[in-house]
Image (spheres, helix red, strand yellow):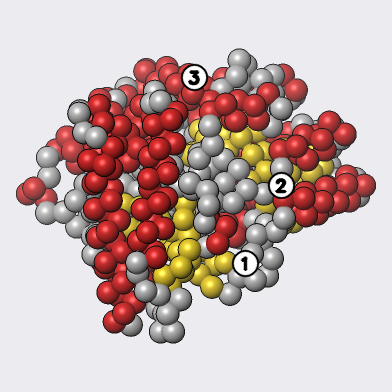
Amino acid sequence: MTAALPFRMGYAPDAGRPAARRDPGESLLAMVLGAGGDERIALDAQGRNRYGAPIRPAPDEVWFASSTASPITPRGWDAAAVRLDQAFNVAATESWFAELRSRLLALFGVPGAEVIFCASGTQAELAALALARSLDGGARPLVNLVTAPEETGRGVPLAAGGRHFLGSAPFGATIKGRAIAGWGGDIEINVETLPIRDTSGAPLAPNEIDARGEARVRAIVASGARALVHVLDCSKTGLSGFSRQSAAALLQEFPDRVSVVVDACQLRCAPSQIRADLEADFLVMITGSKFAGGPAFSGALLAPRGFADRLDKVDWPEGLAAHSAALDWPPALRENIAGPFGARANEGLGLRWEAALAELELFHTLDVGLRARAKWLFAQAVRGGVAATPGLSLDGVCDDAPSTILPIFSRNARALPAEKLQSRLRAKGLHVGQPVKLGGAEALRICLAAPQINDFAARLCGGADETQAFQPLADDLARLFIEWGRIIAAA
């Protein structure tokens, strides 16, 4: 195998920036940070990815879009810059990825757990599918029961079915919707979905979600298939779905026929919860690019202790080479994979995790009460801004809890489509989470991320009182709501 190229042809992180103004070191760092992803990471003529985020820090813009994507933070940029040499030192790359694994496990792991790096949360779905199929050697049909894919990721239903979810992947061109080569044979992979809202967009009762999920899993097992059950820790709108208690009971009842994966890609739960999930023998999907505030396209799948010991080999279709590098996989699992891989290492992914960990590790040193206070102040400020802006309303489920994701509707009679409204806000340097459908309406989302809490804490440590420490966030929210109100008033 050969080392991965530091960038893929056609992915130009410096697009739109005059060449005379580029610092060579900065340009190289941007190039590598923008490599090793799919077409969503490719930059347009303005130097932004599909979600409107640049590859460099953008401190002069307002960022409340962490449910979707954010730019790299200044702390993250500096952390990635320190490790840039690792991307070009083939001899040191394996130890670098081992160190990244150790740092993630120090935050979220339990003894014996493993980390599989993935270019995105959707690629983590492919890794979970490969491991679940491997538990019985791929001998049984598998039914992937996905909770609320409309509130997780657009490509999830395709990935959950063992299909390419875009026309590109980190290490090759693909055909969207086509079965991944090696998974298109006689052993079926089917996808079923479990809703967490009714047709009007109102959240279903947790016990109703559990009852539906349990009934479907029992039917899957009765049919002779294996079930891969998704527990949704936090959706794009802040909801959870299918309880851990129900999932654990099913795993205990059908230990040879049920696997459980927790979708914690938003990473808005406590590390203790992820550790408890691993102790419960659940797989856990996370990303460093949502609440963690790292640049887009940094995912991982955490596997519980002893998982590798249960496998004679990993069910590895050749088509996964387009999605995975050899060093994405820890040695204990990699030795059970015949390959092929798309590259030896995904250096861009490594640097993106460096940036995310710079924020995550700092965030988890903060006092829990301070973190909770920042979240409460944020939620109150958002609710105040919504109340003061004619035509806006909050998704009712968020009225009481200090959520870090708040879906907001524009309900005036001449409301713009949510996507157009988001585009107009973005043109003003104001970024919110992309539209999500809730019943017959679409909401945009205002989100709080770890870097903003880290900055709040830094101002407190610098001598500011609470009001002063929160003021920059309050000012950003005020700027957002003023412009939002102007746009919908002029529609």
Left or right of 396 in this view: 50: left
* 168 or 129: nearer the viewer: 129
Mark positioned earlier in the residue sequence (3 or 2): 3
Pointers 1 and 3 in contact (C-beta within 8 Å): no
Residue on which the image places disc 3: 106
Instruction: Give the class, few, some or many, for how many residues have Cα within 10 Å of label 1's Cα (few <14, many ≥20).
Output: some
**SS under mark 3:** helix
Residue at the image point whose x is 26% and y is 31% from the top: 460
Disc 1/disc 3 C-alpha distance (Å): 38 Å
Left or right of 78 in this view: 390: right
Residue 201: image tag: 1
* 215 or 402: nearer the viewer: 402
Residue at the image point whose x is 69% and y is 19% from the top: 306
Disc 3/disc 2 C-alpha distance (Å): 27 Å
* 48 or 212: nearer the viewer: 212
Residue 148 visible: yes
73 to 280, vertically: above or below: below
Q: Position of residue 440 (x, y in %)?
A: 58, 74
